[in-house]
Image (cartoon, grey):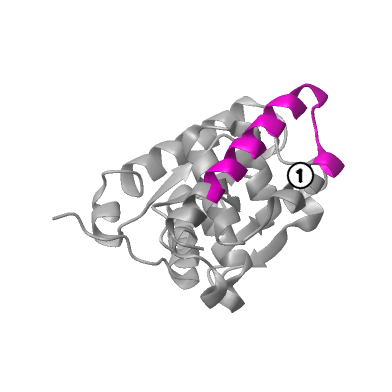
């Protein structure tokens, strides 16, 4: 029988990032996805929906700027370490029921302009610096990427009233980085909103 996913505490996320910092030698990261919503709202966790609290992965990226051989080598070393020791299907995942993924920092670069100002900057007990994306910026990234699992994440967020379609639409319109992506974003938003109505109907809400 499959195990039901468990809620991940903010302390577990932060202590895991501290471990990753020690093993990779990197002392700063950007946190996004469901785990960033948890940390951003760690003082009001009870208000978060289960699909956020029971996320199966923690998404990180490095905070390097620009390109160089040295940066490339550091990122590749960190990628290998995280994949081997904290990644999917590792002993870490089997024990903790979630895994960590180091995502290309170009993904974070797709966030709406001004995301750095809206993010929370925290320092862990282990002195790791973490930039925590604002939930609306996390949702905007999901809109931009637009995989089926991203649309499902947004639909769950709408149905749980974590954020609302008109809020996200306004946020993206006000901060869209690329003109050519506006049509795709509008389609993804519409699909997520339609799916959220189906979810709410199924739940009798």
Give the quarter of the figure containing the N terminus.
bottom left
Q: Secondary structure at mark 1?
A: helix
Residue 205 shown left or right of residue 91 in the figure:
right
User: Where is residue 48 drawn, in percent x and y?
Assistant: 54, 68
User: Residue 15: where, in percent of width, then height?
Assistant: 45, 67
- Pick the residue in front: 132 or 201: 201
Residue at x 44% of width, y 70% of height: 9
Q: Which residue is mark 1?
A: 169
Q: Which residues are magenta?
A: 173-197
Report x, y in % for residue 56: 38, 52
Q: Position of residue 114 (x, y in %)?
A: 82, 47
Q: Residue at (53%, 31%) from the top-left corner?
A: 73
Principal SS element in the magenta part?
helix
Judging depth in this view, the residue of 182 and 119 nearest the camera is: 182
Please name the residue shown 61% across and 62% down the image: 161
Give 28 or 1, whichever is nearer the viewer.
Answer: 1
Residue 1 belongs to the span the image colors magenta = no
Q: Single out the residue that lies furthest toward the top.
A: 180
Q: Nearer the viewer, residue 127 or 160?
A: 160
Q: Quadrant of residue 112?
A: top right
Point 81% across, 47% down: residue: 170
Task: Decide: is 65 above or below 153.
Answer: above
Q: Is residue 110 visible to us here? A: yes
Residue 181 colored in magenta in the image? yes
Instruction: Answer with left or right where residue 133 lies relative to residue 201.
Output: right
One can see residue 133 in this view: no
């Amino acid at each position: 029988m499959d195990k039901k996913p468990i809620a991940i505490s903010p302390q577990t996320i932060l202590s895991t990032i501290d471990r990753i910092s020690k093993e990779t030698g990197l002392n700063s990261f950007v946190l996004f996805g469901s785990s960033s919503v948890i940390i951003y709202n760690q003082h009001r966790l009870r208000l978060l929906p289960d699909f956020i609290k029971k996320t199966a992965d923690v998404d990180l990226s490095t905070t390097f700027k620009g390109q160089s051989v040295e940066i490339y080598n550091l990122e590749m070393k960190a990628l290998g370490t995280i994949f081997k020791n904290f990644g999917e299907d590792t002993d870490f995942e089997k024990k903790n029921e979630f895994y960590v993924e180091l995502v290309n920092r170009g993904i974070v670069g797709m966030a709406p302009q001004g995301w750095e100002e809206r993010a929370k900057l925290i320092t862990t007990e282990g002195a790791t610096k973490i930039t925590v994306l604002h939930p609306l910026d996390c949702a905007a990234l999901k809109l931009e990427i637009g995989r089926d699992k991203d649309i499902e994440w947004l639909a769950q967020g709408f149905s749980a009233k974590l954020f609302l379609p008109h809020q996200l639409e306004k946020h993206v319109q006000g901060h869209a980085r690329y003109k050519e992506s506006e049509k795709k974003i509008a389609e993804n938003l519409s699909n997520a909103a339609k799916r959220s109505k189906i979810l709410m109907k199924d739940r009798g809400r």
